[in-house]
Image (spheres, coloured by chain):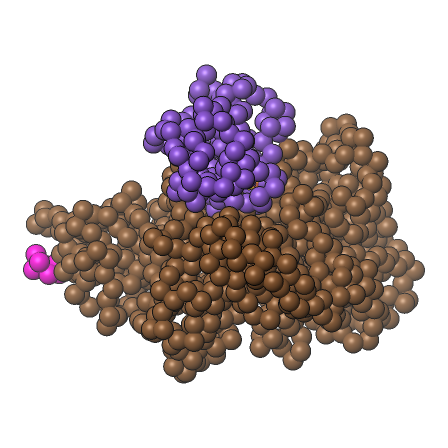
Amino acid sequence: MPKLNINGTERDVDVDENTPLLWVLREQLGLTGAKYGCGVAQCGACTVHIDGVATRSCVMPVSGVAPDQKIVTIEGLSPDGSHPVQRAWLAHEVAQCGYCQTGMIMAAASLLQQKPNPTDDDIKAEITNICRCGTYPRVLAAIKDASKNAG
Amino acid sequence: MIAVKASRRSFLVGSAAAAGGLALGFHVPLAQKARASSAGVPEVNAWVLIKPDETVVIRIARSEMGQGTLTGLAQLVAEELECDWSKVTTEYPTPGQNVARNRVWRNFSTGGSRGIRESHDYVRQGGAAAREMLIAAAAAQWGVPASQCTVAKGVITHSASGRTTTYGKVAEAASKQKPPEKIVLKDTKDWKIAGQPLARLDTIDKLTGKQIYGADLAFPGMLNAAIKACPHFGGKIASYDAEAVSSMPGVRKVVRVDDATVAVIATTWWQAKTALDALPITWEEGPNKTITSAWIAEMLKGGLDSEDAFILTNTGDTKAALSSSDKVVSAVYSFPYQNHATMEPMNATARYTPERCEVWAPTQNGEASLAAAAEAAGLPVQQCEMYKLHLGGGFGRRGMQDYVRQAVLLAKEVPGTHVKLLWSREEDMLHGFYHPTTQCKMTGALDKDGNLTALHMRISGQSILASVRPEAMVGGMDPIVFQGLTANSPEGHLGYTIPNLRIDHAMRNPPVPPGFWRGVNLNQNAIYMECFMDELARAAGIDPLAFRRKLMAKHPKHLAVLDAVAERIGWSNAPAKGVFRGLGQIMGFGSYVAAAAEISIEKGQLKMHRIVAATDPGHMVNPAQIERQVEGSFVYGLSAALYGECTIKDGRVEQENFDTYEVLRLAEMPAVETIIIPSGGFWGGVGEPTIAVAAPAVLNAIYAATGKTIRTLPLKNHKLA
Ligand code: FES
Ligand code: FES
């Protein structure tokens, strides 16, 4: 029975070990903030952090995550939506339909953790999530703002 | 408008409602017999409910799918209501309530950029009526004439006696007041809430993961379903071996949904999908198994010069003018199939018993969803209900109800249990209602001064209406094919005066299901018209802006947006070295739009630096949301221009996921500047029109940079070096 450390809490999950982490989060643990968009690591809707690194959970079998690795989902990014990236997202009103946004925010938060002051080119290289509503210009602006405010 | 006298049920389950809710000639008075209530608080009227704590609940009939309509409609109601905006929340009435209440909220359909422009009038009346009733209730309590009372931000004042009260305190009494007989709406000049760049009402939960989409729904004991329909259009199931998967973990049932479709119901969706992927299925490929993209292109090509065409415009004598001119320019363009590719794949949850059927779904047309559910359940509409959820993207796809029907059919297999059907991305790619494919032959004649004397625009290709709403065709013609090209429709008329003009359509319908795709036919019509305008300008040796301006003297609103983008991009000054410009304009969905782009080509790679957009939607309800819609529309339009293409082989779509159906990502996104020019006097749409001008502006800039005229999309198929 896989053991997982999710949002600071140890969880036992009773699931086939080939099940992607995304579906463990969504269907076993009721954490539906990570979304299903493609299932093949193309869109980033399912992005979570594993030890701080943005990971596309739809292609990560749950057996590939060790019990001591720290998984953080959007639900655990901040207790109340106050993470600098979330605040910047609110200020810029980035979200349209919102479906891609939790993944986008997780990708942005991870980027800022690795590179607190990313250039436009850094952001363009790292944020490859798909948004069909077309929020990209605001994503870019919000990440730059978040980097200022977090610094 | 058609006057409809039929019973509610018969019109609701009729094809018009199911196909997307055509405008029905209903006038629904604001006075209501049945009054719904939310948490025991009586509503003031159908649109407004005010709680004792002053919370203002505004009911929104249209669907929110990211476009901001929810906030915009609430602003319009709140404007007339004179309430405190900071107290406003919203709720969706259900389609079932709409049926029960004689369609008090009218149309639920959300498409064609109509959410606001089609309902601004009656939602504002709803807000105004509620205001009058609230004031009347306060006046009655004080025993003073209502005409002596004023209201601001939900506080009612009788200044003569110095008394004040609040909406929350009189709401219950107001609910018993008679609605006013006459309502005078405010002049838009006096707007304080509408017209302002207010923040959306639906942001917070989207940033924390709390927002529940259809794909996220869960009920105790709920089962999950994964589904596969025959990928070959017109094909069906030959056989499958349910035994092979029935003992896999979690599997409850393998279901033949219909002749072409099989599904697995399991405890979790991942189990259902795993079993479905393992299920041995053979498809009978059906009558279209030899159809390819090349075959379709050939079919459409046959329509470019054929005699059988529906004529939209035929002024002057185009044929004679073309044959007698010294300079004739001709070019053939085409536009491929596109998938909507909403980020949230199709899904719906249903619970069925022999007495009742309930459905939860992201839908662009709640009434059509309810009708589809009732039909699939085999129950009267009155025994069904549908609950709308915020959509993870719609773009036209969720006006179709195929996934709702499937969910109900699956729920019937396990009566009393909630079943959530979620499509895989692959299913979503293979079973779209695709942006139709067309080709277009443009032929223009220039006189010796470079004036355009004649133009023949022949569109050949697929009709959406013929497939999804044949009852809306006009004498066999599909008027929507001509979006943006009509002589005088307020929906979208051509911004050029051309003495000899013929616009016609040879209908060619390949066996690939078409649908309304954000921007619909305006997308390619703008490319055909605006790229060809540049071709003509080049042949005439005239600057593309100057060439257009000569034809636009009688079209001041078209010209105003075009001039605005030209000025902002600095058209009269040379761009920076290595940077090239293009522009385009059109009118669609009731709005005048234009774009100007700056690009460069580095080592054969297109780099889009900047796009300036201008839109004149008549009235402006929320400029901040209009800006976001313009930006988003450009992403959608440029995605199609750069990458979007569903190719057909063996009678099926070849692209199954985002690895082969590429879309625009952040790295390629240009900076967008939006100019809003609300000239007043009409109500135009916002979500769609600007999509159409992104691609022509960029394509015209590519010519400026490379000397290459791109007439077939997507750009990924072309070498720009
Ligand atoms: S769902 Fe994981 S990348 Fe798309
Ligand atoms: S906000 Fe809708 S897909 Fe990104």
Name the quarter where the C terminus of chain B is drawn.
top right
* Res A32 visible: no
Q: Is residue B675 left or right of residue B667?
A: left
Q: To which quarter of the image does residue B36 belong?
A: bottom left
Q: Could you tell me which residue is drawn at 17 percent across and 65 percent down?
A: B177
Is residue B675 part of the magenta span, yes or no? no
Q: Position of residue A45 (x, y in %)?
A: 53, 40
Chief secondary structure of the magenta portion: helix
A66 or B148, which is in the foreground? A66
The residue shown at (59%, 21%) is A119
Chain letter for the part of the structure drawn in brown: B
Judge whether residue B146 is colored magenta. Answer: yes
Q: Nearer the viewer, residue B18 or B171?
A: B18
Tell whether B609 sits left or right of B627: right
The image shows a total of numbered marks equal to 0
B2 lies above or below B666: below
Tell me if B321 is positioned left or right of B232 in this view: right
Q: Is residue B683 above or below residue A125?
A: below
Q: Residue at x 25, y 60 (%)?
A: B130
Task: Report the front residue among B660 and A105.
Answer: B660
**Chain ID, purple in image:** A
- Residue B364: x and y in percent read 48, 59
Q: Is residue B151 above or below residue B179?
A: above
Residue B525 seen anywhere in this rendered image of the structure: yes
Query: Is residue B530 shown left or right of residue B86?
Result: right
Residue B87 location, x and y as percent? 27, 45
Residue shown at the point (76%, 59%) measured from the top left: B649
Residue B471 in picture, x, y percent from top left: 58, 77
Relative height, residue A115 to residue B222 (above, below):
above
Query: What is the magenta range?
Result: B139-147
